[in-house]
Amino acid sequence: MKVAFLQTSPLFGKVRENVEKAVRRLNSIDAELVVLPELFSTGYQFRSKKEALGLSEDVTAGYATSRLIEAAKAGKMHIVAGIAERAGGRVYNSSVLVGPRGVVGVYRKAHLFWNEKKIFARGDTPLKVYNIGKARVGMMICFDWIFPEVARTLALKGADIICQPSNLVLPFCPQAMITRSIENRVFSITANRVGVERRVKGRALEFIGSSQIVSPAGTVIRRAGGRREEAGAADIEPRDARDKHITPLNHIMKDRRVDIFEL
Amino acid sequence: MKVAFLQTSPLFGKVRENVEKAVRRLNSIDAELVVLPELFSTGYQFRSKKEALGLSEDVTAGYATSRLIEAAKAGKMHIVAGIAERAGGRVYNSSVLVGPRGVVGVYRKAHLFWNEKKIFARGDTPLKVYNIGKARVGMMICFDWIFPEVARTLALKGADIICQPSNLVLPFCPQAMITRSIENRVFSITANRVGVERRVKGRALEFIGSSQIVSPAGTVIRRAGGRREEAGAADIEPRDARDKHITPLNHIMKDRRVDIFEL
């Protein structure tokens, strides 16, 4: 199964430009599953809830999702992408999974980072795994990485591949996602953005890129650089994620001593 | 507070030699908490339960523990060390915490790696945190690292410092322990061994060293090399582990969305 990340550099507020640029690149990627960054269509640093509301969109009828579905149809692929989702007067930092036949699933970010708490509503969706034919796919978003329970829960629910749209600024996540892959024996695909975004309250954010595809054994199959837009693809065997043995005598899930764990 | 690891190279089966060498080095270390490797007194590759039973010892009356307590008295320190513990006719892969006044606590390894399952009994102690005055200390052993729930449980129980006696052969743990420190905002001290041990069933094991001290922010304060016996010390402020904020708006423990986590 061919999977890929598409590392982009969204322009803040330019939804149509960002979406069309991404769609053009999607049309040239030969893969069955492609992951885009968090908030790929809007950019990241909203000044207010009102601004976010204005740039957000409904998942089923929105511009970004509609165009992604068209790209999925054309490319016979599934796409995971982060958008600002409007629902019931609120805005969620969401990840959508779309395929040729439409929206497959939506995950609303559970762990909001820093000022996101002032903009977005807290995610109210479960951590869920979707069967897209060749693989079972779970979604998490950016800062969710710091909570090992997120990837663990997705793995316990049967994910072969964890897709992680991101807007990373701290340097720790790419390495931590290797650990997430190893400890759950799953593939992980992190799609991060690059570029520097406008100042909000004196703070300009520089995103670190370094999008990557990691195997269940912890091998970084592909990793992007830190500065440029780029796509990275790999041919993987999703079933590798279903053998949870790290040694013939160690099954990473069955070995878990839940009798002494606290949650 | 001064903390340290002592990276050693035990000779298999030479308990007195291994213990005396470690005690000599302990006497020269200026620290209030020192962590030694897993099975520091016996070596690692037992051929049988019987052999392990012969080399194991009772925690309260054993040679290794008694000598460590003497060293703790002399150095006014606490010591965490891995031993083969005999109890009720069984052998556990254990970690002891001793201080100037004797044994403070024992942890019996919960997650046995590969052939350890044929030698040791499965740990039957809880994950526990001990107050040693200047810090609250938790213990885990080697392969426990791959289960994020272990460090998480110790952190939830209030550990400032996680001590990890190890006999690492795989390359992933030092990096993963950085993630463990970040995701729990705790200090971690990994004491690994070096050297190559005798062949058992054709397999000689080479241990990777790389003992380290990591801060709650994920900084590797000290890291040893991969080939030589060495001690590494650092001056730390255990209270840094009690502020669980990674940003002013993100408390790494309170942010946890346990409502959507599975254990």
Image (cartoon, coloured by chain):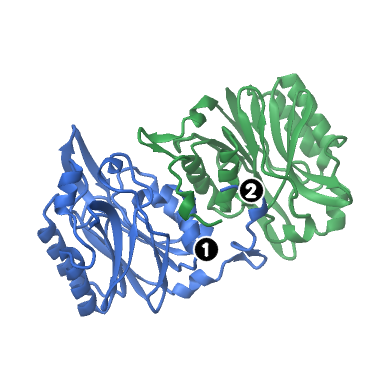
Chain colours: A green, B blue
**Residue A232: image x %, image y %?**
58, 31
* Subunit ID for the residue under disc 2: A
Task: Report if residue A189 is visible in the image.
Answer: yes
**Residue A123: image x %, image y %?**
74, 50
Tell me which corner region of the image, top left, top right, bottom left or bottom right, holds residue A25: top right
Which residue position holds label 1? B156
Which residue position holds label 2? A142
Does dot 1 land on a helix, a strand or a loop?
Answer: helix
Tell which tag, 2 or 1, sits nearer the viewer: 1
Give the residue at x 52% y 36%: A186
**Residue B218: image x %, image y %?**
47, 59
B123, above or below A153, in the image: below
Amino acid at the residue labelled 2: Cys
Tell me which corner region of the image, top left, top right, bottom left or bottom right, holds residue A62: top right
User: Which of A207/A114 is in front?
Assistant: A114
Q: Residues within 10 Å of mark 1 (few under 14, many from 20)?
A: some
Kindly indicate whether the residue at mark 1 contacts the one at mark 2 (C-beta within 8 angstroms). Answer: no
Is there one chain holding both mark 2 and mark 1? no
B81, above or below A42, in the image: below
